[in-house]
Image (cartoon, rainbow, N blue to C red):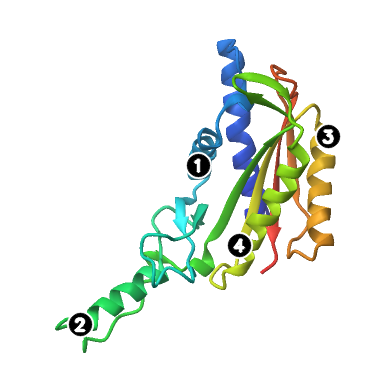
Amino acid sequence: MITVLEQILDASLASLINHADSLDIEQAVRGLDALSELQLHQLIEQELSDAGFGVNREAFYPSDGDAYTNKNHRQRCDFALTPNPDLKLHDPVLEMRQLALAQDTLFAEVPQSAPDLTTTCPPEDAWWIEVKVCSQHAYRDGIPSPNPSYAHELVSGLKADICKLSADPHIWHGCVLAVVFTESKEVATHDLNQAARVCLDQNLPIRSPVIGCRSITDRAGNGCVAVGVIPVSI
């Protein structure tokens, strides 16, 4: 039986491959690796939705320590997936704010009902995904060239997202979805595994990544797109 991680991997990789193929058909001057991270998010969102998930973009982290005192600044996660699109993601911080406001109203003594689990997904049941995009060859001022910060960007980005996901007690299912553009499949697989190993060596709570690769037309030095789904051990 296919796991949720495999579903996330398959949907994400399919979204990128389909768009890369479309660019080839158009004989586009620039390829998939020229898209912004936001544009890649949009491609992935559509395929995850088509796979049957409820997709919440830029979802608020469910346990934001500053959220109760600073209403305008809350951390956001790139994606939070519910098991199906009919389930609305429950926000415990918003619920606490509403309860606090109710204390000053006529309804203060009215018992507050628990969320309806037939229409609401608790954050503990959702899959929380941070997306990290890195390119071995990247566009700078519109010109493609080798990216000297590639390895650092990949490792530091993974570490930051792993720490955010693992620190939230309401997140029981989380992963970092790393999209990398490299010269070859061999480079992509090596780099994703090596980055995960660095994180493990620093005692970050992850499990081994699941990785999918696909060759793409080389327009900027990158002949491969790879997706690595790195699960966070909660």
Q: Write down the quadrant of residue 220 in the picture.
A: top right
Q: Tell me the residue at 21%/89% (across/down).
A: 109
Please tell me which of labels 3 and 1 falls first in the chain: 1
- Residue picked out by circle 1: 45
Amino acid on which disc 2 is placed: Asp
Which residue is nearer to you in this view: 40 or 198?
198
- Residue picked out by circle 4: 165
The answer to whether residue 56 shows anywhere in this view is no
Q: Is residue 17 left or right of residue 148?
A: left
- Residue picked out by circle 3: 187
Q: Residue furthest left?
A: 106
Q: Which of label 3 and label 1 is nearer to you?
A: 3
Amino acid on which disc 4 is placed: Leu
Q: Are marks 3 and 4 in contact (CB under 8 Å)?
A: no
Rendered location of residue 222, percent (x, y): 74, 24
Please tell me which of labels 2 and 4 falls first in the chain: 2
Q: Is residue 191 left or right of residue 226?
A: right
Q: Quadrant of the C terminus?
A: bottom right
Image height check: is 217 above or below 27? below
Measure the C-alpha gap from mark 1 to mark 4: 19 Å
Which residue is nearer to you in this view: 81 or 190?
190
Amino acid on which disc 3 is placed: Val
For label 1, the SS is helix
For label 4, the SS is helix
Image height check: is 102 above or below 141? below
- Residue picked out by circle 2: 104
Measure the C-alpha gap from mark 1 to mark 2: 40 Å
Q: Write down the quadrant of residue 102 in the picture.
A: bottom left
Please tell me which of labels 1 and 2 falls first in the chain: 1
Amino acid on which disc 1 is placed: Glu
